[in-house]
Amino acid sequence: MADLQDEPHSVGIGAEDLPAPAAAVAAGALDRAVALLAVHPVADGCNTLVRTLHQRPYHDIETSDTGVDTDIPRLRAGGVGAQFWSLLVPSARAPENATGDQVLSDTLDQIDTALTLMRRYPDSLCLALSADDMADARNRGRIASFLGPVPGRTLTDSLGALRAFHALGVRSLAPAGAAWAREELTAFGHEVVREANRLAILLDLTDCPPAVACRLAGASKAPVIISNTAAASLNPHPGNVTDEVLAALREANGLAMVTFDSARTGDSLHAVADHFDHVRAIAGPHGVGLGAAFGTGPDHPRPTGLTDPEGYPRLIAELLERGWPESEVAMLTWGNVQRVVRDAEFTARAAGHRR
């Protein structure tokens, strides 16, 4: 495109702009982190702000609000260049006995909320459908906004809902809790995987049982992701991923995205960095990403220094201090997400040729 630039726009952060907790990180490392994020911004796999805004439709995210941890000023201050907006229905509103129609209706409402968000803030957010859209948004100084995941429970006997989601802009599907991926991958589950591959919809294995996650990773021709997790070897939280699954992700060129949640990682920046080290060691430098799961209220427990998106530079500085090469940090923040999105598109094109 004629208006694309060779060098991406700066995300508008500087070490002097960061809050006091940044003092715990060496100044030199923090400067390096800020410079790196200006070129390779954060592509985060999970933010639940859409849920919050679905209940607070008149909230203005152009101004900071202590009632929620995500807004445009803090996303920009943290160097965020791409974001997956989760469209999963909260468990309190979608119990196991909820009908597929109820879950589908709630999911469509959240898609509408997310699309309204893009229209309301066009100078800051833009809908992203592809890896090229990621780069385009970065070059234009906007935050590339992917829709997803949506719950796999919305797919019952037909793939029509999946194709409709794709037409609405959804690019990620979460099989966890779906009848076709509960204890094993059923025949219909294999059909879902093939159709998701054909549509370039990523499979998000968050909260899938380890055996099912490994089967899904093996069945998919495209890379799979886990959009918010941590290492079960360091903390046996039920939402954390086992080394077996991390190894399967490595084999499948997938991506495990580490969350900022005290219950799953520990309550310090150092503890969170330990989880990044472990995921990197098992899944490989190409298999680790960021999935903070921001978008909640102040009562959600967060590690010190990582209470909102402004904390990303502090985490990057900590990883640089631990000896992560800048090339691998650039993959962590941006490159790995762009790779899995692009690989999913390549798989979809190959499937189209085969058809």
Image: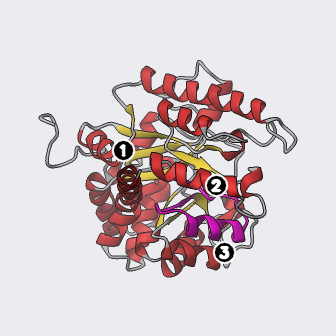
Residue, x 57% and y 25% (percent of image)?
113
* Labelled disc at residue 257: none
Residue marked by disc 3? 242
Residue, x 35% and y 56% (percent of image)?
346
Q: Nearer the viewer, residue 35 or 90?
A: 90
Residue marked by disc 2? 302
Q: Position of residue 1 (x, y in %)?
A: 16, 37
Q: Amino acid at mark 3?
A: Thr
Q: Position of residue 302 (x, y in %)?
A: 64, 55
Q: Amino acid at mark 2?
A: Arg
Mark count: 3
Residue, x 45% and y 59% (percent of image)?
22
Q: Position of residue 241 (x, y in %)?
A: 65, 69
Residue 299 in view (yes/no) = yes
Q: Which residues are magenta?
A: 202-226
Dot 1 lies on which element? loop
- Within 10 Å of disc 1 (Cα), the crowding (few <14, some 14-19, many 20+) is some
Residue, x 51% and y 38% (percent of image)?
170
Q: Position of residue 198 (x, y in %)?
A: 46, 49
Q: Is residue 206 magenta?
A: yes
Which callout, 2 or 1, points to the residue nearer the camera? 1
Mark 2 or mark 1, earlier in chain: 1
Dot 2 lies on which element? loop
Residue marked by disc 1? 130
Q: Is residue 214 above or below residue 312?
A: below
Q: Is residue 303 above or below residue 155?
A: below
Q: Nearer the viewer, residue 199 or 81?
A: 199
| C-alpha gap between disc 2 and disc 3 | 22 Å
